[in-house]
Amino acid sequence: MVTFSIKQRDDKGQWNLLPLTRYSGKTLEQVFVELDGQEVVAEFNLDGNLCYFCGTEQWLERMKRKGAAVSFGYAIARLKDTRPDLLTEVLPVDIASEFGGEVEEVRLFNA
């Protein structure tokens, strides 16, 4: 199973989970392109192994100390070679928001 969440740093230096509702209906590739260059870090849990996709070079260097970390651009290029089906996966339309909640973690079905 593969799940992921995205964190963004706020003005006070605190990390907050981004609600994934803003990406509902987009492909994973579209999401990665949109996040590239932003002050964000996506945490992917690949069956218990953590990997970080980073929006900036600064965060890429910092997250490399915690483990496997790559840029969103590299992730797109790598997945095009190894698992292009994942890049076309569409994030589910979020029904949680209809009930006043937010989705902060998504499971990828083709993983």
Image: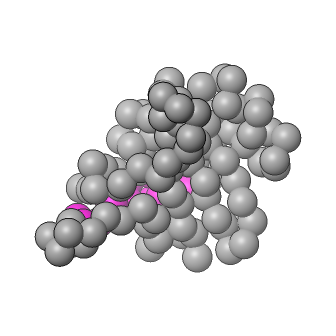
Image quarter hosting the N terminus: bottom right
Residue positioned most to the right: 65
The quadrant where residue 65 appears: top right
Residue positioned most to the front: 12
Closest to the observer, 62 or 88: 62
Residue found at x 68% / y 38%: 70
* Residue 26 visible: no
The x and y percentages for residue 66 are 81, 47
The quadrant where residue 48 appears: bottom right
Q: Is residue 27 magenta?
A: no
Q: Is residue 84 magenta?
A: yes
Q: Magenta stretch: dominant SS?
A: loop
Image quarter hosting the C terminus: bottom right
The x and y percentages for residue 31 are 39, 43
The x and y percentages for residue 91 are 33, 60
Residue found at x 36% / y 41%: 30
